Amino acid sequence: MKSIDHNFLLPQNDKRRNHFRKGAVVIIPLVCLILTLAIIGELLKQTSIELNQLKKSQHNLQAIWLSEAAVQRTVNRLTEDLTYSGETWQISPQEIGGPYPGEVVIEIDRDLIQDPSMILIRTKASYPAKAIERVRVIREWPVQLSNTAIENNSPSQ
């Protein structure tokens, strides 16, 4: 028995349609794959952006904490010595409890405010200290010195 060639029996237009269907079977999944990869790529890009924003937010919060700690440090130093004029405070990662070191520049301005019992404490906190993408927080606090501390440090007459 001879086998019958079904393509021979089909008109020419039907043969072309059959080839088109075979091509569509390959192209449709390929287009779906490309769209899926594009969506995944955008999701990864968005996730990366959000992680960078989270890291900067954490660095900003750490710099704020360092700045506030520097004011407390300055007040403690001033209670011991009213001539304290500031410093550059280097904080190691172990002291911070994080992966990076911090740095705070403490400045005391006695001339900006006319009242001799008032000083201005200025802190410039940087975290991570030496990184290119560090966060710097600059804060100023006017501080009222106690009268007994001023009298004890004033020159005798």
Image (tube, rainbow, N blue to C red):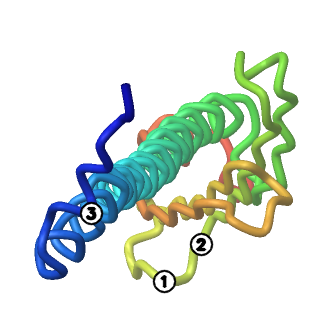
Q: What residue appears at the point 31 percent right and 57 percent down from the top-left corner?
A: 22
Q: Secondary structure at mark 2?
A: strand
Tag in front: 1 or 3:
3
The residue at which mark 2 appears reads as: 109
The residue at which mark 1 appears reads as: 112
Q: Which mark is residue 8?
A: 3
Q: Quadrant of residue 117?
A: bottom left
Q: Distance from label 3 to label 2 (Cα)?
A: 100 Å
Which of the two residues, 38 or 92, is positioned nearer the viewer here?
Answer: 38
Q: What residue appears at the point 40 percent right and 46 percent down from the top-left corner?
A: 47
Q: Residues within 10 Å of mark 2 (few under 14, many from 20)?
A: some
Q: Position of residue 34 (x, y in %)?
A: 38, 60
Q: Secondary structure at mark 1?
A: loop
Q: Is residue 73 left or right of residue 15?
A: right
Q: Secondary structure at mark 3?
A: helix
Q: Is residue 66 left or right of residue 117?
A: right
Tag 1: amino acid: Leu
Which of the two residues, 130 or 19, is positioned nearer the viewer here?
Answer: 19
